[in-house]
Amino acid sequence: SPPPPSASPSPPPPSASPAPPPSSASPSPPPPSASPAALSIEFQVTVAGGSYPSEVSWTLMCSGALIGSGGAPYSGTLSAPPGECTLDMNDSYGDGWNGDQWEGAGNTFTLDSGSYGSETFILIPPSPPPPSASPSP
C-alpha cells in the first residue's frame, strides 16, 4: 500500500496571548466632590414668560456674596453655598414683571407690581439618596 502522504505539520496557531484591549485601562475615578467645607450647590435658573422682558432685571445674593444677575429671558446654572439667599427684582418701567417668573433652586418668584421687590429663601443642599438596600437573592 502506498505510504500515507506525509502530513506536513501545520504551523502552530499563533499563540493568542490574551492581550488586554487598550481601553481596559481602569477608568480614573471622578474627581472627589468638593469637601463639605467648600460645599456649593449648583442650580438652574430661568427667567421667562413675561410680556416686557426688556424691563426686567434681577440680582441674587447668597450668604453675602453676589451669585448671579441678569434680565429676561435668562437661562443658566448658578452655584452658591447653602444658606440664606436674597433675590432682588427690578422693573425699569415700574409696573412689575408682567408675567416674567424667576425660577431656581425649587423656588418661583415674580414681581407683581412696582419697580422693586425682594424675596429671601434658604438654599439647602440636596439630601443624598438613601442607600438602596438590595435584598440578597
Image: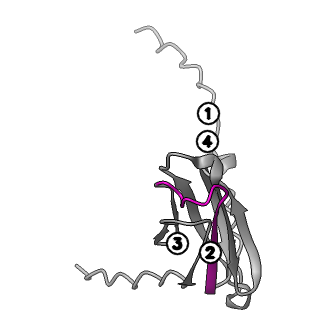
Q: Are marks 4 and 3 in contact (CB under 8 Å)?
A: no
**Location of mark 4 (residue):** 16
CA gap, disc 4 to disc 1? 11 Å
User: Three-letter amino acid code at disc 3?
Assistant: Ala
CA gap, disc 2 to disc 1? 77 Å
| On screen, residue 3 above or below 79 | above
User: Which quarter shows the C terminus?
Assistant: bottom left
- Between tags 4 and 3, which lies in front? 3
**Location of mark 3 (residue):** 105
Residue 27: image location, x then y, percent: 66, 61
Question: What residue lies at 47% left-to-right and 84% top-to-bottom?
Answer: 127
CA gap, disc 4 to disc 3? 56 Å
> Which secondary structure, mark 4?
loop
67 and 1: which one is in front? Answer: 67
**Location of mark 1 (residue):** 12
Numbered range of the magenta stretch = 84-98
User: Three-letter amino acid code at disc 4?
Assistant: Ala
| On screen, residue 14 above or below 117 | above
- How has the structure been colored for display? one colour
Pick whichever of labels 1 and 3 is earlier in the sequence.
1
User: Three-letter amino acid code at disc 2?
Assistant: Leu
Residue 113: image location, x then y, percent: 51, 65
